[in-house]
Image: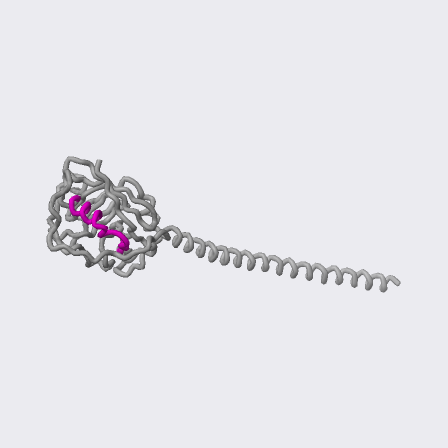
Amino acid sequence: MRRARIEALRAQEQAKARKRRTLGIGAAVLVLLLVVGGILWATLGGSSKSSSTAASSTAFCGNVVSGSPTTKQWSQPPAMSIDTKANYTATLKTSCGDVGLKLDAAHAPKTVNSFVFLAQQGFFDHTHCHRLTTAGIYVLQCGDPTATGTGGPGYKFADENLNDAAIQGGTYPAGTLAMANSGPNTNGSQFFLVYKDSQLSPNYTPFGTITSGLDILNHIAQDGSDNSNGQGDGKPNDTVVINSVPVTKQ
């Protein structure tokens, strides 16, 4: 009788042990499922976030006005027609938003005269900003109707304002508007917008400042480039198109 009771107790303990083991395995499986679920959530969440970011990036520069760049060319720079004592402002109305510019007619009269002339001729309309640099120098380059980096208006003109104190230290400050060139006195239509202080020799004509829209330029920079020209240098990932450039004389 006693032996039978002992055997019964032993059977009960074994049953409890089996139950504990089953619960332990179940808990482990539950933990594993939670971990896997967490990993899947993080992965899918990250994927969803990336897709959302990509969609947001596309939408950010989605306001492209229908049209094609002009094919106009001129053999000589335009005759001086601006008032160098007046204040000129311009707005780059881009597919990503408006970028306001203050033009420095007093210190870069030929450059501003050319820029105003080209803007009024619609030369910049429907052109892609073809180059973005995000390492070493921090600029968005525009003004080429061919979007190849080799296009221009057909004429070239001399450098100006290279003695500007703002660039003498080898830095073009954030907010600078300057001409791109292929060497001394080869200015045409291409210009660049400095969105972050950039280490550059004072070889590029500064002819104005960015008065609004630096946040837009920084957003474009954050979206990066295709890096086709080297580290941090290439075509912007965003579709940056200049729809028009109205100019105002004040």
Q: Residue furthest right?
A: 1
- The colour scheme used to paint the residues is one colour
| Foreground pick, 209 / 30 | 209
Q: x and y percent of residue 171 in the render?
A: 20, 44
Please say whether residue 132 is visible from this viewpoint: no
Left or right of 124? Residue 33 is right
Q: Is residue 166 above or below residue 179?
A: above
**Above/below status of 1 relative to 84:** below
| Region rendered in magenta | 112-130
Residue 118 percent coordinates (x, y):
19, 49
In the displayed structure, 64 sits above or below 215; it is below
Residue 174 location in percent, x, y?
Answer: 26, 43
Q: Residue at x 22, y 52 (%)?
A: 123
Viewer-proximal residue, 62 or 167? 62
Residue at 31% over, 56% down = 225
Question: Image quadrant of residue 164?
Answer: top left
Q: As displayed, is residue 7 above or below residue 144?
A: below
Q: Is residue 81 magenta?
A: no
Rendering coords of residue 139 (x, y %): 26, 50
Residue at image point 70% right, 59% down: 20
Total labels drawn: 0
Quadrant occupied by the N terminus: bottom right
- For this rendering, which residue is in front, 202 or 180? 180
Which of the 4 quarters of the picture holds residue 236? Answer: bottom left
Q: Is residue 237 left or right of residue 115?
A: right
Residue 67 visible in the current orientation: yes
Report which quarter residue 250 is drawn in. top left
